Amino acid sequence: MSSRNLTCSFFSLVLLAGCGSEAITTASTYATDSMAQAATAGLSHGEYVARLGNCVACHSTAEGAPLAGGLKMAVPMLGNIYATNITPDSETGIGQYTFDEFDRVMRTGVARDGHRLYPAMPYPSYAKISEQDMRALFSFLMEEVTAVTQANIPSEITGLLSPRWPLAIWNVVTMDNDPYIPNNNQSDQWNRGAYLVQGLGHCGACHTPRGLILQEKGLDEGSNAFLSGAPLDHWTASSLNGDVNSGLGRWETNDIVEFLQTGHNRFGTAFGTMVEVVNNSTQHMSVSDQQSMAEYLKSLPAVNEINAQPYNYTDTATKQLLSLDFSTPGAQVYYEYCSSCHVTSGGGYYPYQPPLSGNPVIMDPDPSSLINITLNGSLRVNAEKGGPDINDMPYFRLLLSDQQIADALTFARSSWGNNAPSVSAKQVGEIRAATDPSRNDDIVVLRMK
Ligand code: HEC
Ligand code: HEC
Ligand code: HEC
């Protein structure tokens, strides 16, 4: 945080006034202007920026009009809030916003009428958007999106944070309002990737752990916590740093590009909330932008697994299953219910069925995602631009008990060279009680206009 911002934040604490709303003019650079990439991707500059920021994932529902709001979001410890109508309707949408007011709400969370947004809207990340991209985004929303009259649903927040004013304090403690500043010691491509990952892509909103007041524990590579993996909505967004087993340490740049483009690669498949990111955002990016993000992610160091041995396949469990030796808990459940797709070697069938052997998600210290997908299945990755998605993970909620699911996952986490802590029936029971099966049959790609 620069000193200008410290001073500015101090006054905003005292006055509860907006801060960082002064126009910031930055020169257009490869790193921070999306215009050329938009042309490659065949979209207008503003529509491309909206895809990079994945506005549609929160501001639309599958049934509703594009960007008209209404999606319910649970905020941990607080309650429920609803994403708002951001179509240009002047009564219920953002039709009356000027560019300066829009710029302020996007960077600082202070709305046109002065109320403060809950940080479910990822403005701490969007603060890094360049001026050129912000202007293009505003033009897209005002000129290309159809105005829809749809009233916003009031939030259901009780307790301490129900009056919105304490959010000003939240902002002071947590926010840096400056647009992305390129790092001169790094390449153009690295900077472009950093701009997208930290800013518009708001990858940290899910992948970075949060602190006591729900702030992300780091907003860039300067913090070890940045993108080190975090739980949200009963999924775990796995580590994206260089950890060799549960992070991206064994992935090549091309593996990351393939994952962002198609939702598949030789290590695994996008599932849970990551499906919304691939379907509505990353698959629409230019290949060059996917490569830049991959290059930036590959520069993040290992944090938790610095001296760990990288994963190595072993065939003990495969042989055990083939000889129908079910003495290990979970071996029989795995053999009967999982091996038809994930196979006895755990290797799956690329690109149709993901491997469970050597898959970083399987070795995540937090098994929430694994429990959730086994109970409930997952939304489907869109096949429009790449990997076939004719196959789907069935849901086992009705077929298997908490203990059976715990055993099957424990087996997968400790077989074929995988090495991760066991899963308990209690952990499965907790997620069972809090979740419902996904609508497995639908492939949802939200339209923006
Ligand atoms: C992770 C979910 C999420 C994403 C992604 C998201 N928003 Fe939001 N946004 C919200 C929520 C929730 C609110 C309402 C917050 C509140 O009521 O405190 C909101 C509020 C807003 C508002 C204030 C509108 C008003 O009523 O005054 C604007 C403008 C806005 N978002 C624009 C955008 C744009 C543009 C993008 C894409 C670049 C975007 N949002 C992406 C969740 C999101
Ligand atoms: C809405 C929450 C959310 C957001 C935002 C999000 N992710 Fe994810 N991501 C997840 C979840 C949950 C997983 C674990 C499930 C899976 O592997 O698909 C995941 C997994 C991944 C994986 C696979 C990791 C592995 O080890 O298999 C990659 C790569 C990834 N995300 C990259 C990104 C990037 C890059 C961004 C920003 C453009 C991003 N994610 C934004 C939720 C999110
Ligand atoms: C009919 C084929 C099929 C069966 C049977 C099956 N799965 Fe899956 N599984 C999939 C597919 C396909 C995916 C990729 C996600 C998706 O497309 O829904 C997946 C994903 C997963 C994942 C997430 C890994 C990743 O990177 O995507 C886990 C964990 C998992 N399955 C565990 C199990 C367990 C445990 C069983 C047995 C109880 C099982 N699966 C049975 C097809 C299957």
Image: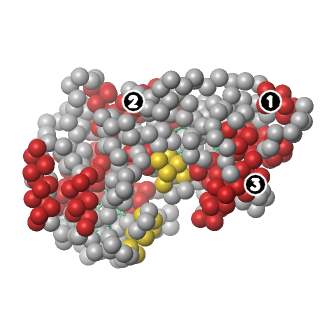
Q: How far apart are marks 2 and 3 (CA)?
A: 37 Å
Label located before the other in sequence (3 or 1): 1
Above or below, comparing residue 301 to residue 127 in the picture: above
Return the residue nearer the eye: 302 or 336: 302
- Using residue 429 as the reference point, say whether residue 150 is left or right of it: left
Q: Which amino acid does label 2 sit on?
A: Leu
Question: How much space separates mark 3 and mark 1, taking CA atoms?
Answer: 22 Å
Q: Residue at x 30, y 48 (%)?
A: 125
Q: Is mark 1 within 8 Å of ligand 3?
A: no
Q: In which quarter of the image is ligand 1?
A: bottom left
Which of the two discs, 2 and 3, labels the residue nearer the N terminus? 2
**Residue identifier under label 1:** 318
- Which residue corresponds to the image point at 56% horizontal and 30% vertical from the top-left? 245
> Along the horizontal axis of the image, is 446 left or right of 323?
left
In the image, residue 362 lies at what x, y percent? 62, 39
Q: Where is residue 136 in the image (x, y as percent from the top left)?
A: 23, 49
Under circle 1, the secondary element is helix
Picture residue at 33% right of the left edge, 37% below the top: 223
Q: Name the amino acid, label 3.
A: Gln
User: What residue would you read off at disc 3?
Assistant: 403
Residue 97 or residue 302, whichever sits in front: 302
Q: Which amino acid does label 1 sit on?
A: Thr
Question: Nearer the observer, disc 3 or disc 1?
Answer: 3
Disc 3 crowd, CA 10 A, few/some/many (<14, 14-19, 20+): some
Looking at the image, can residue 365 be seen? yes
Q: In this view, does 294 lie above or below 373?
A: above
Query: Of helix, strand and loop, which one carries label 3?
Result: helix
**Res. 218 image quadrant:** top left
